[in-house]
Amino acid sequence: MTMRRLVFYGALLALSLAAPFLFPAFKTQLATLWLMIIVALSWDMTGGQMGYNSLGNIFFYGTGMYVAAVITIAIAHDVGEYTAASGGGIYTWTWGQYFAGLVIGTLGAGFFCAVCAAVIGWITFGLRGPYFAIGTLGVAIAAGELVSNWDWVGGGQGITMPNYPGDFERFKLLIYYLFAALGITLFVFVSWLYSTRFGAAINAIRDDEEKAEAMGIHTLRYKMVTWAMAAVFVGAAGAVSAFQLIHFEPLETAYQTINLGIFMVVCVLLGGKGTLWGPVIGAVMFHAFKEVTWSYFLGWQWIALGALIVVVVVYFQDGLMGYLRQRRPDWFGMRVDAGETP
Amino acid sequence: MDQILFNIGLLFQFPLVNLKIVIDGLMIGAIFALAAYGLALVWGVMNVKNLAQGDFVIAGGYTSWFLVRTGWLQGLGLSDNAAALIGVPVAIAVMAGIGWICYRLVITRVVERDLFTSLLATFGLAIMMAQIMNLLFGSDTQSLKLEYDTLYFADGLIDVPIAKLIGVCMAAGLAVAVILFMKNSRMGQAIRATSQDSRAARVLGIDTERVYAFTFSLNAAICGAAGAIIVMVWVIQPFYGITYSIRAFVIVTAAGLGNLPGVIAAGLGIGAAEQYGSHVFGIGYQQAIAVLLLLLVLVWKLARQRRQRRVLE
Amino acid sequence: MNVRNALLSAASAVALGSSASAMECGTITLGSAISLTGKYATNGVHAQNGYEFAVSKINESGGITVGDKCHHFEVVYYDDESKGDRGATLAERLINQDGVQYMLGPYSSGLTKAIAPVTEKYRIPMVEAEGASRSLFNKGYRYLFAVLSTSEQYLASAITLAAEKAKATGKDPSEVTIAIAVENDPFSLDIRAGVLEHAGEHGMRVVLDEKLPRDLSDLTAILTKVKLVRPDVLVISGHSKGAATAVRQIGEQRISVPMIAMTHCEAADVTGNFGEFAENILCSTQWAETLTYEDPIFGSAANYNAEFKAAYPEYAEKPVPYQAAQASAAVYVFKDAFERAGSLDREAVRDAIAETDLASFYGQIRFSEAGNNIAKPMVLRQIQNGRYNVVAPSAFASHDLIWPRP
């Protein structure tokens, strides 16, 4: 069993490392797939495992993008001057400056988002049920609107990041591996986390918060820490996206509340909420569906997507993993009836 | 900062402007209140948080717009104005039908499920509706320009287009009609009973399924009316639904469920607050102001709740 | 849409068959991510129609002769949903998966900004027709070419007109006050920059400077302020929805500003929708059907106008927006460049595009080092009795400016 599992994980790892060489024309889509996996997995940390359905995780994505952009620009230039320029000077980055921006920007984005999560969480985790979802959604929308009016970071113009100084195909490989590394780290991290006492504690919060509190779990602290951990990864993913996209603007790309912000939730539901593999499988299914409809059903893609969401949410609430768990409990190490399992 | 101070200065330099801002705010607020009113109904009665609320509004607007543009009614000898006014009841009827279909296909399966189900299912519905309208009517902004005059007061500073006035009166009339209906009719009573305790209502022989279907259609119809009024006065576009959805959520959250007069008051208040906000800070902050108001309300409620809990302890 | 395209291509096939050219033609595939949904969808569709019209027109008239072989154009479209990140992804997909070697631009400066880094990195020549912001042309892009004039020129001539009128009435131009309301996006912000630059030259004072939100449906708050501060010039830019909302509410609120200048009047069809409310408003345009430009494929500007209306009946009742005309011009630039390059080699075609000096129905097209068209002026039209009449620059003016607005 463990041997089989080892082979399985090894093969999967090898596949993810080799993917950009197997499908060289699809590097960007594959990178985006990792992005979906990252945001879905980190959404499930609070949404699935802790029972707090945030609609505002996109806030960390957008904030991560802006933090990375500001850091990268500030390394070489004056930010206000750079964003205000609409003509004239051409701005350049050296290799050293670019990579310093990439590293510091990504780490800085993760750190800053964790702080944001702790602060926002301290306020919003008092909200229960729908109000938590609406409140976090509100934070994300308000942040987008405010940033789009903030001239220092470019306002509605958005920000243009430096171009990668080298070959473009290399650059896409770099982006792919950054996303993949982030995704694999996150997966390993959560699979460890869910097996610890900490995991049990946040599950207890999901199942019955009052009881958890009564048992001596400091719930607010657990909630803040969990959300902050999720925010680190979403923020870092946002930072890498900023480098990948080169140009981005606040409302449609960075704080894209009604797109990625909701898609990550749909991914999790599609795969199965509160499971380890659910978000990953859901992200893969969702991304594949989206890419196919976007290429072949031009004009109808949103209708197809809306229909998918409705069908999934209404009929397959437990997602694929939930369905499998019901049909093949033995795969999950559950024994329904010892006598009949083969 | 100078701009903000300058804008505040204007308010004192021309005191009448305050009146103008309040009037404009109340007019748009009346429309917000209608959409929020429907949301309060479905949220309160069947615990469905309808994110497609704004898209129902826009769909109602397109219904009326389509009716006027095809010119069927004008063919019968009616003027554009009359056709637009007839557009309101037509939008009510059509949207009631669409609401019923949505209920049968989707909503019936999410009633009384957890919050996320209804939020996401109606989100799916919302993006479908927006795109269908985009395919049907194109993505241009549309509006009906009616042959009504505009009333001017105070040297032309305050302008009240009669179309706006009619729209607001219709909104008010509709709100009163719905309140009376909920109070006095059998169906209204059944709806209220179901919202208080659906199981008990069922035991007492109320067909809650019918009540739900009716409530949802009623909500869609109210939204449709709001849309038909909007298209006479402001503009619509297939992707504008989200603004009305956000406002509806802000208002209902602020007013609380089951407090219909509160919803109307909050709607009018938010309309006025937004107009003041966009006068002082600039129109670019309109959406941000609405959302920040929502957050303030949530935090304020939370603080009050905590205080109460402490008192209990 | 698809039905019409099918009909068009069927029509062109018939035309080809009858014109006795039975020889086999190759295909040159162009790619474009264009906004069919989202906030730019109105103009995205105008642009797509412009592309399609030009493609069928060029194919009908014998296609593109490269060397001695004839080729036909074909365009692969994706919907970028008016979102930059989507546009960039789709550009990559066009290049990588669909093997597109030549790109047509998306709609709007913001989208072009998002896509240009991708085409640049792949060395794919992109001729774009809808991205006018100057911030596109200071990045040193080699493969980006724009057939249109940059956006700071859109309404700058209105400021010059205002200065002239002030002088004519014995005032100093520095007494002129300006109110600006532009959408918060790269295109409109660059228009604002152009207006500010020109206002600065004349020492004019900007009394109101606001940014419009993307879900704009109500300008009341700004117009009320306009009533209070009484500027001499009101500048509005917010793509089609901004123009529609502004014209309607300016009429309803009886805003009496001596000069009102805006963009996208034709695209929003303000004369058809709002009648007398639109009177005497100044509209900037890249192209007008009354101008005397000509070329062998599309004929005169007026002829383009007539044939475009015949091909797309939905424009019958309204002016053909310049967004469509310039999209057609972009396709024409490609045809011209392919024929001059005499090969399908990408670098050769790129160099040929860079050397373009083309007289087209859309105006003269010649690119600067940075890639923008420097040979064609912007024109300012005024809506007079429901018609768009050119009033500036004076070389093209067919009518006198009505000033002040009554």
Image (cartoon, grey):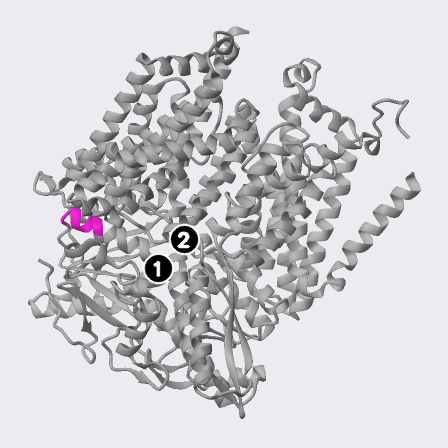
Q: State the residue in front, A207 or C268.
A: C268
Q: Does C215 appear above or below B229?
A: below
Mark 1 or mark 2: whose residue is earlier in sequence: 2
Amino acid type of the residue that numbered disc 1 sits on in the rendered structure: Ser
Q: Does C122 appear above or below A266?
A: below
Residue B261 falls inside the magenta stretch: no
Which one is in front in this view, the residue at disc 1 or the one at disc 2? 2
Q: Callout 1: helix, strand or loop? A: helix
Left or right of residue A71, residue B257 in this image: left
**Residue C133 in view of the camera:** no
Q: How many badges with numbers are in the image?
A: 2
Residue B223 in the image, given as x and y percentages of width and height: 35, 33
Residue holding disc 1: C188
Magenta segment:
C248-254
Image point (19%, 72%), residue name: C390
Magenta-colored segment: predominant secondary structure: helix
